[in-house]
Amino acid sequence: MNIIVKKIFDKEQLEQSFAIRLKVFVEEQQVPADAELDEYDSLQSAAVHFLALIDGKPAGTIRMTEYDCETAKLQRLAVLEEFRTCHVGSALVSVLEQEAKQAGYGAVLLDGQIQARKFYEKQGYAAVSEEIIYDCDIPHVRMKKNLV
């Protein structure tokens, strides 16, 4: 299987990204649909969106926003169930980190679901606090990785 991660520049790819997020977050995890899409979900927003393809099929997505002038924020990482053992998440995180470095950020911050904590730790992220953050009734932990 060949994973290709593309920066999203067109509406069709953005729609493919949204379809993945809706399947994972809204259908599987019962996040309200109106809470899933926000002001960063357009090509004109400050967010950078990425789409992972396996053999040409959309498999996963992720986006990057600015947390502060030194820190990028990793958001909305979603991988379709049939591709979750194919290292799609790792590929998406890696490309986002490269993009963050090129943009001049020294760190990446995320609020990861508790169930994904071990995944993020394997990518080099560490919890910045043990405080649990609830987003759409799902427990999250704030994590960070220094890029320099």
Image (tube, helix red, strand yellow):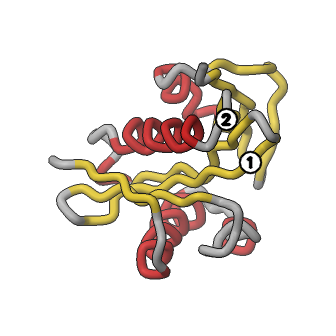
The total number of labels drawn is 2
Q: Is residue 32 visible?
A: no
Kind of residue at badge 1: Glu
Of the residues under marks 1 and 2, which one precedes in the sequence?
1
Q: Is residue 98 visible?
A: yes
Could you say whether the residue bearing mark 1 is in a helix, strand or loop? strand
The answer to whether 53 is drawn above or below residue 41 in the figure is above
- Which quadrant: the C terminus? top right
Residue at 53% x, 63% y: name it.
21
Residue at 18% x, 48% y: name it.
2
Location of residue 40 in the rendering, given as x and y in whole percent from the top left corner:
70, 66
Location of residue 89 in the rendering, given as x and y in whole percent from the top left corner:
42, 41
Kind of residue at badge 2: Tyr
Q: Nearer the viewer, residue 25 or 45?
A: 45
Location of residue 17 in the rendering, given as x and y in whole percent from the top left corner:
47, 67
Could you say whether the residue bearing mark 2 is in a helix, strand or loop? loop
Q: Is residue 43 left or right of residue 58?
A: right
Residue at 45% x, 59% y: name it.
7
Q: Nearer the viewer, residue 9 or 33?
A: 9
Q: Which residue is mark 1?
A: 66
Q: Is residue 8 left or right of residue 55?
A: right
Say which quarter of the image contains residue 133.
top right
Q: Which residue is mark 2?
A: 105
Q: Is residue 59 left or right of residue 111?
A: left
Give the distance between the C-alpha atoms of the residues marked 1 and 2, in whole angstroms.
9 Å
Location of residue 33 in the rendering, given as x and y in whole percent from the top left corner:
67, 72
Check if mark 1's residue and mark 2's residue have beta carbons within 8 Å.
yes
The answer to whether 146 is drawn above or below residue 135 in the figure is above
Residue at 72% x, 46% y: name it.
138
Q: Residues within 10 Å of mark 2 (few under 14, many from 20)?
A: many
The answer to whether 125 is drawn above or below residue 112 in the figure is above
